[in-house]
Amino acid sequence: MDEIRPFHPAEDGATVGLFWVSADGIYVGAPATAPAPNVVLTAEGPQVTGPHPRRWTWADLVGLEITEVPARSAPQRWATHAASFVAAALDAWAPSSPTEMTVSVVASDGTYRTPVYSSAAVAYSPREVALSRRLISHFTQGTATPAVMAEWWEQTRPTKILRSREREAVLELWLARA
């Protein structure tokens, strides 16, 4: 799966792991335009917006899983970037649609699945995916909330697109506060 550039400039938000962090909220993947669904993480719990809205508290959840995540090693991501540049130079490049991931909210009354768009430019690093999943696990276990992400945004507001190592460092910071 090819990595897609974020839908908004860095000043509007930042991709950190499997999340889009902005003043508007914490999204799993990139924020999508209605009527497409979004999964928004709040201190109280996750909520799905769009045609089939739902809301849960973290205490209601058994788990929250993100699958079909585009993950590639650094050399694979560089090769994809290089191929995109060559295709653009040959005028053979056409932008592709953002890659879809699946969010599964596992609650005591069943599992709810919804697609979300990846916010990665090419793909996430495998480490970034693992750290993101650990953070989600802390949310569902009640040992952390997405408030740590919102606080980081308010204090930092990066003005550039973060590189994978920078995103991993931010995820580690959030995990250390969990």
Image: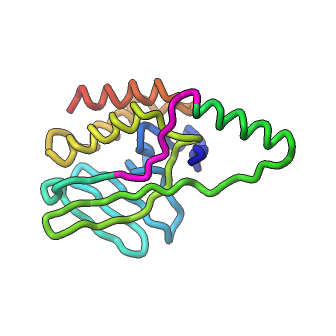
Q: How many labels does the image show?
A: 0
Q: Please tell me whether residue 13 is drawn above or below residue 50 in the rendered image.
A: above
Horizontal placement of 121 versus 42: left or right?
right
Q: Please tell me whether residue 173 is drawn above or below residue 13 in the rendered image.
A: above
Horizontal placement of 176 versus 96: left or right?
left
Residue 110 location (% of width, % of height): 20, 69
Display colour scheme: rainbow
Name the residue nearer the viewer: 145 or 103.
103
Identify the residue at the far right of this view. Answer: 90
Residue 113 painted magenta: no
**Magenta span covers which residues?**
66-75
Identify the residue at the far bottom of this view. Answer: 51
- Give me the residue at 39% from left, 51% from top: 28
Residue 70 painted magenta: yes
Picture quadrant of residue 152: top left
Residue 42 location (% of width, % of height): 28, 52
Main secondary-structure element of the magenta-colored stretch: loop
Residue 140 location (% of width, % of height): 19, 48
Residue 102 location (% of width, % of height): 40, 58
- Give me the residue at 41% from left, 44% from top: 19
Picture quadrant of residue 47: bottom left
| Quadrant that contains the C terminus | top left
- Give me the residue at 60% from left, 46% from top: 2
- Give me the residue at 24% from left, 66% from top: 111
Q: Please tell me whether residue 160 is drawn above or below residue 55 in the rendered image.
A: above
